[in-house]
Structure formats: structure tokens, C-alpha cells
Amino acid sequence: MLGHAWVFRKNPVLFFQRNSAIMGPLYSFKIFGRTIHVINDPNLVHEVLVGSMNSYSRRKSYAFLRELLGEGLITSEGEHWRKNRRTLQPGFKREQLNGLIQGIQSTTDEWIDSKLQSAPSPTELHKEMSQLTLRILTRSIIDTQWDDAMDAFHLHLSDAWDHLSAQRFRSGSLLKFGNPRRKQRGEQAIAALKETIGRIVHARRQSKHEASDLLAMLMSARDEESGDGLSDQELIDEVMTLVIAGHETTASALTWTLHCLALNPAWIDRIREEVKSFPNGPWPMEVFRQLDVTGRVLQEGMRLFPPVWTFGRRTLDAIQLGEFLLPSDTSVTMPLVGIHRHTKSWSHPDSFNPDHFLPDAVQSRPKFAYFPFGGGQRMCIGSHYAMMEMQCVLARLLNALDIELNGPRNPSLSALVTLQPGVPLPCVFKPRKSS
């Protein structure tokens, strides 16, 4: 009955990475009697996400998130998803996001200034990045003074994530054996998060103030086909999706990238060299297009430690996938933690080497050897925003601060909804030494 359940649940990342090295393009395993088909080949990933995307559903794979995210873009599909994606897409084009860059920079600089103005002291890397990215994202999405509510929001978010992560790979028959106290805390946290966002949406509806944040964009957006806007409930679901999913993924990516950089300081020097000619104070948008090294460093961090560590789908009918016939209503997973380190696509796959993302290297491998934001029509709508935010944080942080990592070189991994450190990563941020 249990099949591979205990091995998988003990360390799913190691499970996928080991099997990626020894298995073929597609293999299967069982967990609590359920068969899961694992895609281990970039071309088959392309077929699922692009070529035959309408033959697969993601609804069941992400059902565990619906309690928190409602019918937002991550959890919905069908006509509801298509309408809302059409409605929201124009607001996430690069040119539309330009107006947010000054807010991202000012929030980042406030955090940097707090480090410069206080004596260097031990802190925890993932906690710092989580708090910073939540502050950036909430101010970008909802230009409201969050300072009084930020700590409570962050705590509720942690309890909600803990509750939902525990359900992700748990069989329905085993849910009753879960931790009731964690479940209660999680449900209360989700209710509090939704109440907070709902209150802000309602207040904005009543306000005559013209804001320039993403919430204003969402409220003014109209479906090009029907002319309809988003209802209050749809607004709440989409804001929750943007805040929660966007915050968790960027915090994870920045944490792991800074961890890699602390172990490979030559790349810190290269980032600093890249930005040394940039103007003091806020950078204009065209500067961010010049952050080639910084961008490649982030891409390599997300290759080794993809924030979303696996994508799931379910077949709608029996379907031929390459040489394999998959039955109807069966689970398919695409583990980035395996594919991103597959020896067929990557030279020295376990080493930190941002030159993996030089143009010639990118052209030499299949497109879906690397897919941190997904792909096809369901590709993350906020990918441009996320990269802009992370490049800003990384470049400005390293231009002002040194980071001293005092934790393990190879920390354990915690495969929750996102890929997080399994142990604390103690560190110290210090004013940058003059070179």
C-alpha cells in the first residue's frame, strides 16, 4: 500500500534528483496506493505544458491551495481562468510595470539603510528575505501603509503555509491523522489573511483616491471580449494569489542565490563591477536592462534551487506522451529539482556557474531544461515583475552590503509549497568594505 511513500516524504528533492540520474524520460512511483508519473525529459515537459496542454488539468494538483487562494490564476482553469488571464495580462507587460520600479527600489533601500545604521548582528537569511520581499510586494500591489499590520500578516502567512504544505502529498484517507492544532492555526490564519485583503479591497472601492499600484490596475482592468471587470471576490482571490505566491517564490530565490553567492564570492565582485558605473540614488528603468550578470546569477540560483520545485498535472483522458501511454485521470509531475540538474542538459549540473545562461549555452539545450516560471499559456503572469524585483534587490544589496554566512555549506532542504532551507541560515549583513 505505502509503495515509495516513506522514502518520498522523507526527502522528495533527493528522491527526484537520484532518480533523475538513473531513470529514463518517464518513470512512475506509488505513494499511498496512488501512481504518479514523473517526467524526466525537457521535451516531454514541453509536450505537457505547451503541445498538449488542453489534455491535462491542474485543478486537482493545486486543490490544496484553493483554501487560501480561492479561484485565482494558480488554482482556476477553464473559462474562469481564461477570462481572468485575459483581463489581467495587459497590466503585467514590461512597460506597464515600469511605474513600480521606484517603489521596489525605495523599499529595498529602506531595508539596506536599516542595516547600515545599526551595528552588524546575527540574523537569519531566509527570514530577512521573506520580510523584505513581503514588504516590497505588498507596497507594490496595495500602496497602503502596512507597517502596523506587517508582522501579523507575516505570521498568519507562515501558519497558513505550514497548514497547506502538510496537505500537499497527504492521501485523503490520511488527512484525519494530521496535526489538529496545526490545522486549526492554519484555518484561522487563512481567515485572517482573507479578512485583511477583503477589508482593503472594500475600502479602495469606496475611496476617491487615485492610486497607481497593482490593485488599482486590477480594479480598472476589463476583459477585452466581454468588457467585464473583476468582482470583489475575484479581486480578493487574485490579490491573495499575487501577494502570497509572489512573495514566497521571490523570498526563496533570493535566499538561495545569496547562499550560493556567499560560497562563490567571485560572482559578488562581478555584480559589483556591473553596477559600479550606475548613478547614485534611484536607477532609471533602462539600467535594469543592463543587469546581465545579475540576471544570470539569479537564473543559476533558481536552477539549483527552483522556488517552485515541481509542477503537477492530471490527465483528462488516456494520452500518448512520447513513447508512453498514460491512462486517464492519472497524476503527472515535472520535478524541476531533477530536470534542472540533469546531466544531459547541464555541464557540471551541481556546481554554481551563471555562465550556464550565456546566450550560446542557452541555445544549446532544450527550452524546458529550465522552467522556473512554468511555460505555455499557464506561465507565471508575474515573471517579469519577479525578475525586475529580484535584480533590484540583489544588485542594490550587494552594492552596499557584505554578507557573512555562518550556517552550513550544504543545508538540508524543506520541500514545502516552495523550496526552503530545512535549517536556519545564520548570517550577518555588514557595510561593504572599500575595495
Image (spheres, rainbow, N blue to C red):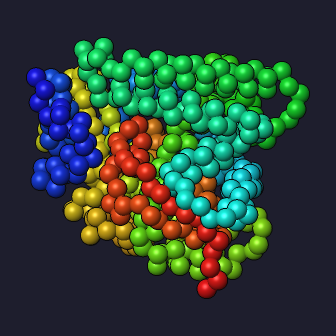
User: Of residues 373 and 21, which is closer to you in this image?
Assistant: 21
Query: In this rendering, is residue 289 above or below 79?
Result: below
Q: Is residue 248 left or right of residue 209?
A: left
Residue most toward the bottom? 435
One can see residue 128 in this view: yes
Residue 163 image-quadrant placement: top left
Name the residue rendered at 29%, 29% in the picture.
169
The quarter of the image holding the N terminus is top left
Query: In this rendering, is residue 400 above or below 237?
Result: below
Residue 109 image-quadrant placement: bottom right
Name the residue rendered at 74%, 30% in the picture.
220
User: Of residues 40 and 46, which is closer to you in this image?
Assistant: 40
Query: In this rendering, is residue 163 above or below 137?
Result: above
One can see residue 76 in this view: no
User: Of residues 117 and 143, which is closer to you in this image?
Assistant: 117
Name the residue rendered at 28%, 65% in the picture.
349
Name the residue rendered at 74%, 35% in the picture.
148
Residue 142 image-quadrant placement: top right
The quarter of the image holding the C terminus is bottom right
Residue most toward the right? 208
* Residue 42 screen position, x and y as percent: 28, 51
Q: Is residue 13 left or right of residue 90?
A: left
* Residue 216 screen position, x and y as percent: 75, 34
What number of labels is visible? 0
User: Of residues 411 and 317, which is closer to you in this image?
Assistant: 411
Query: In this rendering, is residue 216 above or below 135?
Result: above
* Residue 132 screen position, x and y as percent: 62, 50
* Residue 404 screen position, x and y as percent: 51, 68
